[in-house]
Image (spheres, rainbow, N blue to C red):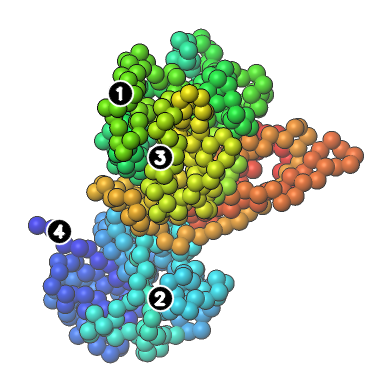
Amino acid sequence: MSRSLSILLVGEGNFSFSAALCCFPSEMSVTATCLQPQEEALRQEGALNNMQIIKDSGGRVLFEVDSTKLGECASLQGHLFDRVVFNFPHCGRKSGVKKNRQLLKDFFLSCIQVLAEDGEVHVSLCNGQGGTPADQPRRERHNSWQVVAMAAEARLILSDVRPFESDKYQIYKCTGYRSQDKGFHLENAMLHVFTRSAPFSCPQVFKMEESVEGEKIQYNIPSELSDYISRGFLTPDSVHPVKLVQDFLLERLQEKWSVSMTTETLPLLITAKQLHLGCPDMDHTLFYWIHTCQKELDCEACTSARESEGKGVDGIRSLCSPDVDLEGETAVYMLRPSLRPLMEVAKTEEWTGVETEMEKKDLQGIHLDHGVASSLVGVSGLVFQNVPVKHWALPVFHELLFTGVLHKKYEPVKVLEETLGTLLAPYGVSLVTKQEGLHLVAQPMGLIGKVLTNNSSDVSVTVSLNLDLLAVLMFSFPDWRLLWSHDPRFSQQFAVRPTPGTPFTAYSLYPEIFSFDISFWTEMAWKEKKFYGLVREASCGTVEHVKLIDKFSHPDLSQTSYCYRLVYHSHTHSLSHTQAIQFHKRLEALLSSCLEVTIR
């Protein structure tokens, strides 16, 4: 038997809405409150009768309850509500939008003190007041109540917005417009549903130990990448959209190509030599160079990080010490920017034997499908690229890589091009011929994969696909960062294994966007990649875009001034103006301590 739904209504006038709720047959426990004393509330038409309906249904009626101080109300102590409802909040009389915004903000901060963990906050507003795209016509931002921004101050996100269906509540009579006994304009009024946001994932110390070319290596993952490690999106039982996309691709490709995926665990760390042998054409500016920890004594970064544990985000410094060469001139290792250098490592004797046997069968015509020889070996996993902070620049993503040497007479490149083109065209992916092979591109993200070929007597084919960007396309995500959400409302949508093409339903609607500039002087050679890392670390990944808007070298002093514009925007968490400013101040502190700049 399901438990009764506990509902708290605040700011009631004549209690007609609360009484209307009590007339529904569903199980619910209603607590109706108003700001006025009992004597004043009873003067409203129908109030006495409505109060009796509430009490007869087992509900409570409370007076002199301030919606902005719910935590202080003695009658509400010890109660948590599944739903807190505030219909048409208003400061009264001809109060302006700023006062009503403050009312909303104070209400949200108050109601979370009595809201159940998975509870909802319902706020009904007249058309245009909310300031969201759901309002038609939509007011200019400065003339609206900015309901999403006010809720974000209490770490609430807008999960749904829909028309306020006043016809459902037959005895409801809206009152209180400008403190008068007359109703608000209900035509095209909107009901806004808010829920709690998941907490931000704080950067943390992430120490790794791996065997690289037979030697055990200890090192620290850069703190801005710590939330991307060990998430297990590609495990066999995963239903994460990245895994669903991989399964979809392999299933379709295996209709023409036998693809054998390795299950061997590959190290995240590779050497510069491995990279040069595996993909000498890769841009060296994309590398995350890693300096290993001392074997006997912890490095300075490890010690500093451990001392910071338990102090929260504010206590965590970057794991890279300022005196360490960050450009890789002395570094030997890097986080793998691609799986191509590890493809040979992945080919163990057992796997090579499988590959060889498959190739033999291909040449004998055993594995032919429509006249195409088909034998490829594949691997997938995380790769890391030290890219600027931009909308579609991913510092971490899952790469699907498969390769093989195929008989030239079966035109494998042509068949592969046709197969991928047919498979991905419905999602906006097109194939562009380049000198080294094919590029898979889509708007607005750009490059999402490559098909590299090397023609000889046979054809060597290597296909590299960015599974994260493909997941964005196939499930219609507004932002790639959603893929890394810890919010259960994200994972629940994929528990039923939806097929690619099923659009993702956002659980945070119309998130606020904040733009701040940061300016500073530096005397040292500017390390922009380190700056991007600190931006990601300080903001918990909420900065969507960074743009250099000004640079000035002082003619007399050996100093250079930089000014960057940062855009804060999150589809995964409630990001308030207050929180964005805190992140921005944290960035200033990290820049001063880690890059020794002088904030202007």
Q: Which residue is mark 2?
A: 125
Q: Position of residue 416 (x, y in %)?
A: 41, 39
Residue drawn at (39%, 49%), measured in percent from left and top?
422
Q: Residue at x 76, y 32 (%)?
A: 524
User: Disc 4 and disc 3: Cα gap in Å?
Assistant: 59 Å
In the rendered image, the vertical position of residue 177 relative to residue 406, given as above or below: below
Mark 1: amino acid: Gln
Answer few, some or many: residues within 10 Å of disc 4's Cα (few below 14, many 20 plus, some between 14 and 19).
Answer: few
How far from the left and from the top, in percent, is residue 5?
20, 63
Camera-nearest residue between 546 and 577: 546
Q: Which badge, 3 or 1, comes first in the chain's sequence? A: 1
Disc 1 target residue: 364
Q: Earlier in the sequence, mark 4 or mark 3?
A: 4
The residue that mark 3 highlights is 415
Camera-side mark, 3 or 2: 3
Q: Residue furthest front?
A: 409
**Label 2 residue SS:** strand
In this rendering, does residue 166 appear at all? yes
Label 4 or label 3, whichever lies nearer to me, is: 3
- Image quadrant in which the N terminus is located: bottom left
Q: Residue furthest right?
A: 556
**Circle nearer the viewer, 4 or 2:** 2
- Of badges 2 and 1, the one in the foreground is 1
Label 1 to label 4, Cα distance in Å?
A: 67 Å
CA gap, disc 3 and disc 1: 19 Å
Residue hosting label 4 = 3
- Which kind of residue does numbered mark 4 sit on? Arg
Marks 4/2: CA–CA distance:
30 Å
Amino acid under disc 3? Val
